[in-house]
Image: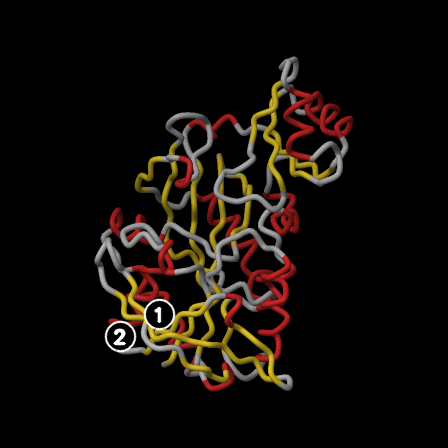
Amino acid sequence: MRIVFVMDPVSSIVADEDTTFALMLAAQDRGHRVDHCLVRDVALDAGHPTATLRPAHVRRDPARPIVLGEAEDVALGDVDVVFVRKDPPFDSHYLWLTLILEHLRDRTLVVNDPRGLRDANEKLYACMFAELMPRTLVTSSKARVKHFLDEVGGKAVIKPVEGHGGGGVFALLAGDNNLNGLIEAVTLDETRIAMVQELIPEVTEGDKRILLLDGEPLGAILRVPQSDWRSNIHVGGKVVRSHLTDADRRIIEAMAPRLREDGLWFVGIDVIGGKLTEVNVTSPTGIQQMTRLDGVDYPARVIDGLERRVAGG
């Protein structure tokens, strides 16, 4: 196959951490051609998506994990897979990308589906499954946030709906002298909506990342907070081995039909204390840590799935 990864610059890749790197390496090891491009390299010519691609040579070299070859303009309708792995945030450039890739429908496999990427804000999409979540409010109103905080016992978490990697996430505590300032900071003085969730006591034990492939569990890791209660890898969370509980499986079974319907094939869900908190669809991470802890070649399983889909299986 010829697989195009639409992603960030290769200079940002960390060879022993990044999921995108692991997927590219697994595809290369199978003998597939792997190409790299940036969002700005994708264009639409007379209704046909094209891109300036560079062949990617992938190796476990911390200094230069991905070496790019000469650029070539290619019609994306002639490749087998376009794998969108651009890190959040989902901004206007990301939106234009999905609208261009929409023209590949029924021609080239795009993972995840461009329509699904547009519809599935990584915070708000979880609200499609509100019965699986902790008590959650989405608002820009300071008064609503403070009333919600009182209703849930004086402890909550607030986060911007376009945030990622633990950025801009704060604990809200009733009576805190900084309460108004924190709400104002996240809502930009009540001009931007934010998600507020009841604080789950088990957050101190960790945040479970579960990777799903076509609605089925691939594996899981537990991200344990170190310096504060946030457990994201980007803010220093420690990763330990984990397993699926009955509550996790109920969440997955409830979500799977909708994920498949929306074309969200490779997804990461975050679960704390048996409650769904987020659904990551743009570039879910954790596969390398999961592979090391479980001794299972999870990236190869993802490429297996791509091979089956391209073959019509």
Q: Above or below — where is 311 with respect to 137?
A: below
Left or right: 143 in relation to 98: right
**Element class at badge 1:** helix
Left or right: 172 in relation to 75: right
Question: Residue at (58%, 68%) from the top-left corner?
Answer: 97
Please tell me the numbered disc located at residue 109.
Answer: none
**Residue at the spot of label 2:** 30
Q: Amino acid at mark 2?
A: Arg
Q: Quadrant of residue 207?
A: top left
Colouring style: secondary structure
Q: Measuring from the top left, give residue 248's x and y in whole percent.
A: 47, 45
Q: Quadrant of the N terminus?
A: bottom left
Crowd around label 1: few <14 · some 14–19 · many ≥20 (10 Å): some
Q: Above or below — where is 114 with respect to 279?
A: below
**Residue at the spot of label 1:** 303
Q: Measuring from the top left, give residue 311's x and y in whole percent.
A: 41, 83
